[in-house]
Amino acid sequence: MRSLRWQLGASYMRVTLGAVLLLEIIVVLLFAQGVLYTNRTLHPLVADRLEPVVADLLSSGLDARALQAYLERPIDVRSSGRPLLLLIPRPEQGFTVILDEQGDVWFDNRSQDPVADLPQDGSAPVEQPVTSSLPFTGNDRMLTERALAMAEERTMQGLLRTAYARPIETTSGVVVGAVYFESSLLPVPWSLVNLAVGGLGVAAILVVLVSTVFGLYASRPLARRIENLAVAADAWSEGDFSRAVHDPSGDELGRLARRLDRMAMQLSDLLTARQALAGSRERTRIARELHDSVKQQVFAASMLLGAARRAEPDEAQAHVANAERLVEEAKQELEGLIHELRPVAVEGRPLDEALRNLASAFPKEQAPRITLDLSENVTASPEVRTAAYRIAQEALANALRHARASNVTLHLSREGDEIVLRVEDDGRGFVSSSSEGRGVGLASMRARAVEVGGRVEVRSEPSGGTRVEAHLPVGEVQA
């Protein structure tokens, strides 16, 4: 069960790590939106500080170098606060564009830096390009020109960028230009990357440690309960249904344990009932074997002894010899019944020979005349031959004891994959519809046929004789 605990711990770790990763993404997105919101809030404040300076420069006709010089002038941070140069949007996470009153670009901090590389000899500055992935699109210019034309603020907001435009007015209220600020989250600033990577690394370490420990600790009761189920299942597989799980929990595993306990009780009751039924069936089978074998032979021997009592000495001696043979066969039958419950008469012999010996065992004086119609070399499995012999034995005995028949025909043949055994007599018969309840004999014949996959048909009429016909499958014939 240790592997299960480790698997549960790993599952906790994966789920928790996924949750932390999702939470990390949400936190980074919220932080990014917070940065964007902060920039959006700062734009009007920066414009308020920049407006009077730009208005004076535009009114005086100076170029953008004067503004750049003003932005980069040395100041005392302690007295004036954060420098304006650090507040206006700059590449790469934004830019600032200023238009004059004609709508021409007067200042653009993305395209050049005219002051930073100002020559010492007073010559014209060398323009230095600044790489930026944020173009000044037609929508951006339209927003700025609209602010210039309508003399009012304009804003444009999105998930990745925010834009702000407002007109620049002199102290007397004359519009001399417009300023445009844009702040963007693309490209992603290193602060966000560092936050995400650092937070994810710390979270991963904590998740691995905490979830592993928690998983191992939390899975102990579950592993113990599953171990109890496994032990109980092992006991049930060995036939010990007295072992129960006894899990009173209300969760799915507890309900499963209670169902398994009920199943074990039901299996125990079923096994007990099956054992009792098997014993009853075995007793019934032995009774049928004794009825179909030893009883019939003892009955035939008693008839031979009765005939010997009334016969001449030579004939009486022959009857006694036949009776001795039947008694010996009955003895062998009992031994065979003990070992395999298979008649000795069919062991190692063809079925037709066994049936001839069976017919010859009946005394000729008191027995009906038996006509044999037996096909030779009829092969069948030992079980089928045994069933056929017992059915013929029972049918002949019934014809002698009950039917009071004068003639009996014993027929044996093979038809396709079946052997057909038929016993017909001209005795007094009985009503066929009442044959189901007539003693053990008829039921025994039907049961024997069903056991080997066959059937027995009994047809009889009062004073019209009886016909017993058995259709039995050949089965697997032993070489």
Image (cartoon, rainbow, N blue to C red):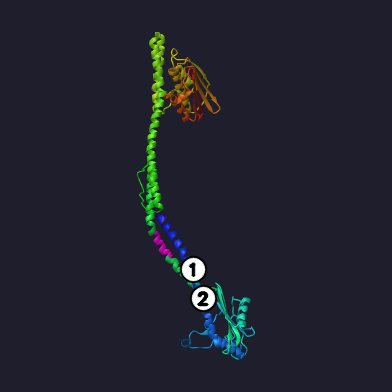
Query: Which numbered marker is on residue 26?
Result: 1
424 or 117, which is in the foreground?
424
Q: Is residue 105 left or right of residue 475?
A: right
Which element type, helix, strand or loop, lies under badge 2?
helix
Instruction: Please identify the dominant SS of the magenta region.
Output: helix
Residue 353 at x, y = what percent? 48, 20
Residue drawn at (42%, 66%) of the image: 206
Looking at the rendered structure, the secondary structure element under dot 1 is helix
Q: Residue 221: horizontal and vertical position, in percent?
A: 37, 55
The foreground one among 411 and 405 is 405
Can I make out residue 350 in this image?
Answer: no
Compared with residue 60, is residue 425 higher up or lower down, i.e. above or below?
Answer: above
Magenta span of residues:
207-216
440 vs 257: above or below:
above
Going by the numbered disc 2, the residue's amino acid type is Tyr
Q: Earlier in the sequence, mark 2 or mark 1?
A: 1
- Residue, disc 2: 37
Q: Position of residue 83 (x, y in %)?
A: 51, 85
On screen, residue 18 above or below 234: below
Q: Is residue 109 magenta?
A: no
- Is residue 124 placed above or below 417 in the rendered structure? below
| Residue 16 placement (x, y as % from top left) | 44, 63
Q: How many marks?
A: 2
C-alpha span from label 2 to label 1: 16 Å
